[in-house]
Structures are given as C-alpha cells and as structure tokens.
Image: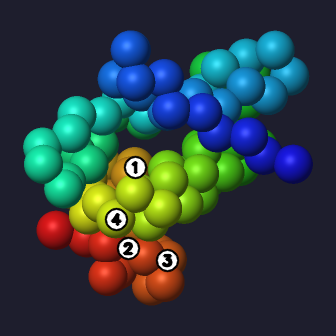
Amino acid sequence: MTHVTDNAAAGRYELVEDGETAYADYRRQSDRLIIDYVFSPPPLRGTGTSGRLMEGVVADARAKGLKITPLCGYAAAWLKRHPETHELLT
C-alpha cells in the first residue's frame, strides 16, 4: 500500500519506496495547495513512484477541502491526464 505523508515542517509530501524518498514541495495559501516541484530519486524513475505520490497529494487535498495549483510541469501534466482531479485545479 502506498503511504504518502505530509511533512508540513518541510513543506512537502513524501513517499518512501525501496529506501528512497520521492517528494512534492508545496506551499499553502488559504484553501490552495501550490505544488512547486515534484522530485523522484534516479533509482525510482520510471517505476510509477511520482504518480503514486501525486495520488496521495490529491487524496490529501480532497480530504482537506483544498484546491491544487500545479506550478511544477510534472504535477500539471499528471493532473491534466487524470480528469477525475480536474475539479481540484485552480
């Protein structure tokens, strides 16, 4: 099971797989979650880790009633490919 955690102190969501940490840097502005950057370590690239990370980010945003503003190109492209997330976009 994928377990994405909100490391609020660091301003990022994190997903640990195979001892490596993928993360999405974010900022909160009232009811908006601004995703600045998504990073996946080289050993995890091409394995779907970043997609699983984004699924966790979306789930948390929904649970908290937040809209998402993706500044990161990867996050924007991922959200665009997933129509079920479009109501969250700002």
Amino acid found under the numbered disc labelled 4: Gly
The reply to whether discs 2 and 1 touch (Cβ–Cβ < 8 Å) is: no
- Tell me which numbered mark, 1 or 4, is placed earlier along the sequence: 4
Amino acid found under the numbered disc labelled 2: Lys
Q: How many residues crowd around disc 1 within 10 Å: few (fewer than 14), some, or many (20 or more)?
A: some
Q: Secondary structure at mark 2?
A: helix
- Tell me which numbered mark, 4 or 3, is placed earlier along the sequence: 4
The residue that mark 1 highlights is: 74
Distance Cα–Cα, label 2 vs label 4: 19 Å
Instruction: Give residue 1's position: percent from left, percent from top.
Output: 87, 48
Mark 3 or 1: in front is 3
The residue that mark 2 highlights is: 80
- Tell me which numbered mark, 2 or 4, is placed earlier along the sequence: 4
Residue 38 in view in this figure: yes
Vertical relation: 76 (above or below) 27 = below
Amino acid found under the numbered disc labelled 1: Tyr
Q: Nearer the viewer, residue 3 or 65?
A: 65
Drawn side of residue 84 relative to residue 22, left or right: left
Picture quadrant of residue 8: top left
- Tell me which numbered mark, 3 or 1, is placed earlier along the sequence: 1
- The residue shown at (32%, 82%) is 87
Vertical relation: 32 (above or below) 36 = below
Distance Cα–Cα, label 2 vs label 1: 10 Å
The reply to whether discs 3 and 2 touch (Cβ–Cβ < 8 Å) is: yes
Q: Nearer the viewer, residue 82 or 1?
A: 1
Drawn side of residue 41 relative to residue 36, left or right: right
- The residue shown at (34%, 80%) is 86
The reply to whether discs 4 and 3 touch (Cβ–Cβ < 8 Å) is: no
Amino acid found under the numbered disc labelled 3: His
- The residue shown at (73%, 25%) is 16
Q: Secondary structure at mark 1?
A: helix
The residue that mark 3 highlights is: 82
